[in-house]
Each structure stands twice: as C-alpha cells, then as structure tokens.
Amino acid sequence: MEDSTPARRPGGIVTVMAVAGIVASLMQTLVVPLVGELPKLLGTSASNASWVITATLLAGAVTTPVIGRLGDLYGKQRMMLVCAVPLIAGSVICALAGSLVPMIVGRGMQGMGMGLIPLGISALRDLLPPDRLGPSIALMSSSMGIGGALGLPISAALAEYASWRVLFWVSAALSVLVGALIRLLVPATPGRASGRLDVAGALGLGVGLVCLLLGVSKGGDWGWSSGTTLGLLGAALVALLGWGRWELRAGDPLVDLRVTARPQVLLTNLASIVVGFAMYAQALVVMQILQLPEATGYGLGQSMLAAGLWMAPSGLMMMVVSPIGARLSAARGPKVTLIVGSLVMALGYGSSMVLLGSTWGLLVVTCVCNIGVGFAYGSMPALIMGAVPRSETAAANSFNTLMRSIGTTVSAAVVGVVLSQMTVSLGGHVLPSEAGFRTGMLVGCGAALLAAAVTLALPGRRSAPPEESGVPAASLARSER
C-alpha cells in the first residue's frame, strides 16, 4: 500500500516536475526551425520529411494513456524514469541520424516522453500536502505551454548559429538531467491500482488513434476525399467503437469508461479538446504572419529566430498566471477558472481583429490568449482529479492529455484548410491571404467560446474527490447515472 505521507520537500518536487514538463514539451517544437531544411539534410522529399513531426505526435498520443495506466499500477515515479529513457535514446538517435528512417524513429521515441506531464501532475496528488496541491498542479500544467514557447527561439538560435545536431545533443543532455533529478528528488510512489495492464485495450486504442490522427493530420496533403484519408477515418471509427466495447467488458480496463462517462470527467475532456483546438490556432496563424514578407501588405518580415522570440513571452505568461488561477480555483472552484480561461482566450482572439498589423500587437494577442490557456490548463487536472479515485489518477490525467492532443491535431487540420482555401498570389507563390488569417483567428475565438459553453454544463463544485470523501467510487458512479 502506498505511503500517503506528504513529502518533506514539496518545493523541490514541484521544481523537478515543472522542469520535466518543460523538457518533454520542448520536444514538440524542437524541429520546427528545421522543417524547411529537413529534405536536404535527410536526402528526402518535403512530404516524407513531414513525418519527422507527425511521428512525435502519434507516438505521444498512443503511448500516453498506456503510460498513465502503468503509473497507477506500478508507481508514478518509476514510470517517469521509464519515460526519460526514450527521451534520451531518441535524442541520441536523432543527433546521429543521416537519413529519414532513423530520424523518424528517434522523433517517435521523443514523443513517448510526453507521458511525463500527466504522470507528474498525478504524482503531485500523492506527494504534496493539500495546501500546496492547487498551485503546483497549475504550474505543472503550464509547463506544456512554457516548453512549447521557449522551444522555438532556442531551437532557431541553435540551428542558425551551430550544427542542427546540437539541438538533439542538448535535448539528450536535458533528458539525462531530468531523469537524474527525478531519481534523486522525487520520492517513490508505489502503485495504488490493482490488476494488470489491458494489453488488448492498449492495442485497440493505439490502432484507433493512429488511424484517426493520421487521417486528420495528413488529410490536407492526401486530399480529404481521397481513399486513403477516408479509409483511415473509417478504420478509426471501427477500431475505437470496438475498443470501447472491449473496455466496458474488461476486468482491468486501460481506461475505465464508466468513470470517464461521469459528467464532470466527460465534460472536462470535451472542454479539453476544444481548449486544445483554441490554444493551437493562434500559434499557427501568428507564426506565419510574423514570417511572411512585408511585400504582402500584412506580413511582418521576421526571421524564424525573431518570430520565436516574439512568441516566447506568451508561453512565460502561463507560468505567471498559474498561481492566480490556483487561487481562483481554491476560492471559486476549478469550473470557474476554466470558464474564465476560455473567455480570456476568446478576448485575445477578438483583439486580433485590430492588432494583426504589428509585432507588438501580435505580442499582445498571444499573451492574452496564453493567459487564458494558463487558467484553463491549470484547472482541468483539478477537475479530473476531483472526480476520479486515487487509484485511477494517472490514467485519467493521461486520457485528458490525449484529449488536448486531439484538439491541437484537429486545429492544425481545420486552420490549414482555411488558409489553403483563402489565398493570394505574390511573385509566383501562393500564400494565405489576410482574410484567411483573420478567419482562422475567428475560428479560434469560436472554439474558445464553445469551451466556455461546455464548461458551464459541468456539475457544481464537489467538496472532495471520490474515495477521499469516504464515498466509494462505485457508489458515486451510481448516484451520477
């Protein structure tokens, strides 16, 4: 049975968890500055080179729910150490890669490290005293935005002033550091759950997610009406329906769908999809506007490095507002915090209608949007953990992280379609038009407002999570049906 005594060094634990989250999320934007150079560096086509990014997305989405379940079964600290292994190995493989296949393998292994974030959030519930839990969860959640925002300028600077291989050697060194800090400063957290890993459920979910995310992320390249895209989306539907049927009958399911169907968990996961969509839309639009040539009349002519530096403060805003969001959640409940975050995001998107014309205006837009993301991301784990038993904390948080990933993938596809359909011609090149960018921002605004509407439907604030209030999870599930 796991020791429930709060750790004696909560500050050190939170710092380690935040650093781990930042390093894991850095991997998502690590190769963005290299996208244009990858075909030449790896001796392949631009279409094939895009798999270097897609592999990370797929590996993270497929493995995160499995890693979460293993964390509940065998201990969160142990699984965080396991996650550090593919981060290190993948970084080394990429640093040594001279062709496409090893690069894709390495990037896929780096994507597996994303499981560090939900595991870290879940471990905080076991390791910290109640008065430190809310602010620490908010900070850990904000690490995803911080790492993503810092990754662009850091990667661009290293790629511009040093060899591209240095990017991966640095990521390998950071991953080793994270593993060492976890081993030295994070206490062991033996598993709370009983049973064993649902291997069939993991395979079914993996097949369904690969088909879904491949169809959505590659649909723009292959054609939305192509046989490949439609076949993948159809296979995803069949696989996920079959997976759901299996999970409902399994004795030790990978994801307890009955718990997931509780109103608070279900609606929080739906809101997470929409928030992930809204969070990513502005990043796609703003980064392109910053780098388009001034000759377009709306582009701002910034280099990749300069554009990354203009984007970096917005990620840091998530860290700044995380303690404010935690205090709001403590006073009014995480439901209110999620609503506030969604509305602040909508305000940021709305302000873009008058601020798109300058770098300083875009800085304001991205900072306001990411303030909203900071509030929203900090509240969602609290909502999830307030509705699931301790024995399912890591699995539930991992599934919630998966929902956010699905939202960002769909966002990339939808905004990509908008920008590809609304174009102008300049010097023989077809570029997204200003109207296309404005439409993309309005789509993001609509998504943020939808997230607020979904959150309004959440049940009222519950005073204690299941099994902490003395109410067995099964009884609670019956009372909510």
Image: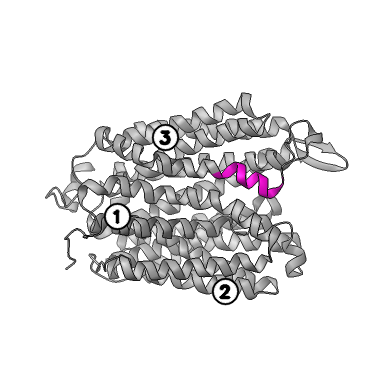
Q: Please state which of residues 456 and 118 is positioned toward the viewer in this rendering.
A: 118
Q: Label 1: which residue?
A: 11
Q: Is residue 310 magenta?
A: yes
Q: CA distance from mark 2 to mark 3?
A: 38 Å
State the image coordinates of residue 315 (x, y, percent, origin top left).
50, 44
Question: Residue shown at 41%/32% (left/top)?
Answer: 452
Q: Write down the region rendered in magenta.
A: 303-312
In the rendered image, the quadrant that contains the C terminus is: top left
Identify the element where label 1 is drawn: helix
Q: Residue furthest right?
A: 428
The local crowd at label 2, few if under 14, some if 14 to 19, many if 20 or more residues have their Cα within 10 Å, is many
Q: Is residue 164 magenta?
A: no
Q: Earlier in the sequence, mark 2 or mark 3?
A: 2
State the image coordinates of residue 272 (x, y, percent, origin top left).
42, 44
User: Left or right of 186: which side holds 372?
Assistant: right
Q: Earlier in the sequence, mark 3 or mark 1?
A: 1
Q: CA distance from mark 3 to mark 1?
A: 26 Å
Question: Residue shown at 46%/48% (left/top)?
Answer: 404
Marks 2, 3: nearer the viewer: 2
User: Mostly what secondary structure, the magenta segment?
Assistant: helix
User: Left or right of 28: which side holds 248?
Assistant: left
Q: Earlier in the sequence, mark 1 or mark 2?
A: 1
User: Left or right of 228: which side holds 148?
Assistant: left
Q: Label 3: which residue?
A: 341
**What residue type is disc 2 on?**
Val
